[in-house]
Amino acid sequence: MTIDLTRLPASPLTDALGRPLRSLRISVTDRCNMRCRYCMPEDSYVWLPRESILSFEEIQRLVGIFADLGVQKLRLTGGEPLLRHDLSTLVSLLRSQEGITDLALTTNGILLARHAGELKAAGLRRVTVSLDTLRPNRMAEFARSERHADILDGISAARQAGLGIKLNAVVIRGYNDDELLDLIEYGHSVGAEVRFIEYMDVGGATGWSQDQVVSRAEILQLLEQRYGPVRAVRESDWAPAERFMLADATRVGIIASTTAPFCRTCDRSRLTADGTWLLCLYGETGLDLREALRTGRTDQEIAGEIADTWRARTDRGAEERAAVPSRGILYQLESLRADPRREMHTRGG
Ligand code: SAM
Ligand code: SF4
Ligand code: SF4
């Protein structure tokens, strides 16, 4: 598929704040086999209707359009993306898309051991596994899953398959804030960089409160106490994680979305599993691309709508939230039930 470039900007498409459209997170399902308290704390959810979920061909078509508009980086996420049947077929479809230089997957790792080999064979190079704790009993209580050992097996299998691995840990006071050093040591033992994420008040984080957030500053202090001086490693200005090097050369990332948001360099947008395109993790509404696909609009027309929407983008959700005095939870449960697209497991994190 090729779009008539005379209708599109010759230079990179940028939003109203000068940020390029470069990175797309694709949620392939809103279902999940875990119930992390910061994301899906409830017993029951309003799921997206099955018939609304984009097929692989629909995702591929949209990715082609986005790539022609400048998107280079894709991340498959969810819900739990490995619950989507035959995900490696989608990987191979997207891998061969011209213009896409980076394709990654974020997973809770429970099903990774089963799929690591086929994902690698399909062309996946990197995987991010969410691992908040090394203690199975903590995970059982916090995320209502007994499958901690499966996650560790998944990490080993990914390593064996030759996939690059990063580990994501959301740090929550009173849950896992005494495990940061253990997680770094574990990461070191499996050749994976650990990224600590500040607890955010997004989507289903209905139990969020400021006092549970372990800030970037606190995390750095802890690391310095244990490892001595920590050096900032300068990388791309567009990456969400700040990277640091410990005295023993181990690298660690911190994603300070709550206390030091990085909206001014945000080149990311999100596609929900039902084809709603969101311009910000905190975005209230999105552009319905499923409708556009299923009502026979041409690639050219869809590209025009995407470009116009991006040009008008002014979203700075996390920065705006950080400026709210006496910040509390963002959404009440009823509001999440009324619009499941506000859920973190629907928009992909
Ligand atoms: N299920 C997969 C997983 O957990 O890796 C992919 C989807 S999950 C929504 C993507 C990422 O969002 C995970 O790393 C998760 O830890 C993070 N996340 C979810 N809720 C969060 C919150 N309230 N604050 C910060 N990160 C959160
Ligand atoms: Fe946890 Fe990811 Fe599932 Fe959310 S989508 S409950 S973060 S495993
Ligand atoms: Fe980007 Fe929105 Fe996150 Fe800010 S809050 S970094 S604008 S997705």
Image (tube, grey):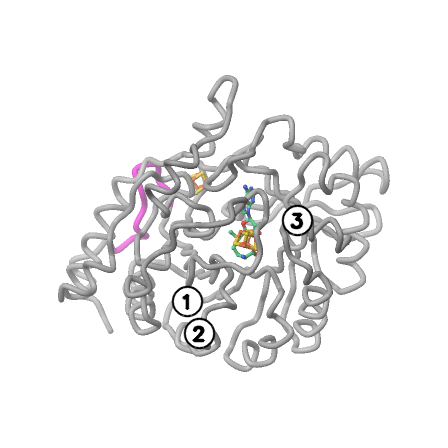
The one of 347 and 245 positioned closer to us in this rendering: 347
Amino acid type for the residue under numbered disc 3: Ala
Examine the structure image and report whether residue 12 is included in the region drawn in magenta: yes
Going by the numbered disc 2, the residue's amino acid type is Arg
Main secondary structure found in the magenta portion: loop
Residue underneath mark 3: 169
Q: CA distance from mark 3 to mark 1?
A: 27 Å
Disc 2 within 8 angstroms of ligand 1 (CB): no
Structural crowding at the residue carrying mark 2, measured as other residues with C-alpha within 10 Å and reported as few (<14), some (14–19) or many (≥20): many
Q: Is residue 128 left or right of residue 265?
A: right
Q: How dense is the environment of label 1, judged by Cα within 10 Å: few (below 14), some, or many (20 and up)?
A: many
Vertical side of 324 occupied by 345: above or below: below
Q: Position of residue 72 (x, y in %)?
A: 41, 61
Q: CA distance from mark 1 to mark 2?
A: 7 Å
Name which residue lies at 24% across and 53% down: 288
Q: Choose between 254 and 349: the one closer to the eye.
A: 349
Of tags 3 and 1, the one toward the viewer is 3
Earlier along the polypeptide chain: callout 3 or callout 2?
2
Residue that mark 1 sits on: 100
Quick check: marks 1 and 2 in contact, CB under 8 Å? yes
Amino acid carrying mark 1 in the image = Ile
Q: Which residues are magenta?
A: 10-19
Query: Given this view, does label 3 or label 2 mark the residue nearer the observer?
Result: 3
Give x and y (percent) for residue 176.
Answer: 73, 42
Viewer-proximal residue among 166 and 232:
166
Q: Looking at the image, which residue sits at the far front?
A: 43
203 falls in the magenta region: no
- Residue at label 2? 95
Query: Horizontal and vertical percent for residue 22?
Result: 40, 54
The x, y position of residue 261, in whole percent, is 52, 34
Q: Is residue 146 above or below residue 267?
A: below
